[in-house]
Amino acid sequence: MEDAINYSKYKKQLINHCRKVISEFSRTRANQDVYIFVIDAQSDIGTTLIRWNTYWGLNETLKLSSYKAKTKDEIYKHNGLKYSIGDFYFEELVPDPDLEKLERKYTEFMGNSDEEDIEYNHNKFMTTLVEVLLEIKSSFELLHKTEEFISYVVDHDDDDFMYLRKTVDEEAFYKAFPELKDVAIY
């Protein structure tokens, strides 16, 4: 099986990019009550988007007319707006050009590959993202996090919890999602 990209180079560049994004945000007035940080990936085309949210950001989203009728459960439970990655108020605004080059190379490779290479590279890509997130955990000290702060990787069109256990321990999981404690989902 063939690697679509140089994964060690990609990992290093993404680590540096994530640290830069976190550092820049940490110096803003919005750096309060950060409760989530996510690397949102599309493994079929090799792209990532760094997203995070704060309680202020959630409240700003709730001011939009399409969200005003939401119930408390529709907002705060594990499958509610609070954890709806596409609705996060914050995301990276300036993509890294070197990462974009690797992403284009990955996309091209995947478009011309057989099923075996596609599955292999999908798995390697997602594993690399989990490694990146574990590597940047010390950078989260720059953030004013909530007690229930969590960080994880998601493959955009898959189950949000698929990779969560690789970066969120059981205690943090139940702080973030206390309503799931009796369900024994972890």
Image (spheres, grey):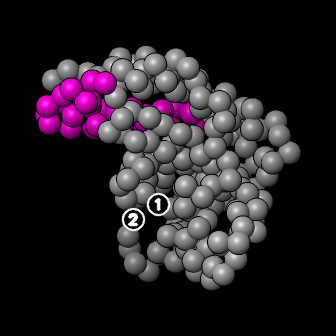
Residue 7 versus residue 84: which sits nearer the camera? 84
Q: Which of marks 1 and 2 is nearer the N terminus?
A: 1
Q: Position of residue 24 (x, y in %)?
A: 75, 32
Q: Which mark is residue 114?
A: none
The image quadrant where one finds the N terminus is top left
Answer above or below: position of 92 versus 57.
above
Question: Which SS does the magenta portion mostly show?
Answer: helix
> Is residue 60 left or right of 157 when viewed as pictured?
right
* Cβ atoms under marks 1 and 2 closer than 8 Å: yes
Instruction: Give the residue type at disc 1.
Output: Glu
Residue 134 versus residue 124: which sits nearer the camera? 124
> Is residue 144 left or right of 134 when viewed as pictured?
right
SS label for mark 1: helix
Question: In this rendering, does residue 17 appear at all?
Answer: yes
Q: Which mark is residue 186?
A: 2
The image quadrant where one finds the C terminus is bottom left
SS label for mark 2: loop
Picture residue at 54% right of the left edge, 27% below the top: 15
Picture residue at 81% right of the left edge, 48% below the top: 30
Q: Where is residue 7 in the image (x, y as percent from the top left)?
A: 37, 22
Tell me if mark 1 has few (under 14), some (14-19) or many (20+) residues whose alpha carbon lies within 10 angstroms of its own: few
Answer above or below: position of 47 versus 30.
above
Answer above or below: position of 122 versus 56.
above
Residue sitting farthest toward the front: 65
Residue 170 versus residue 122: which sits nearer the camera? 122
Q: Position of residue 140 (x, y in %)?
A: 65, 40
Q: Position of residue 17 (x, y in %)?
A: 59, 26
Q: Which mark is residue 170?
A: 1
Q: Give the range drawn in magenta.
A: 108-137
> Is residue 53 left or right of 114 when viewed as pictured?
right
Check if residue 135 falls in the magenta segment.
Answer: yes
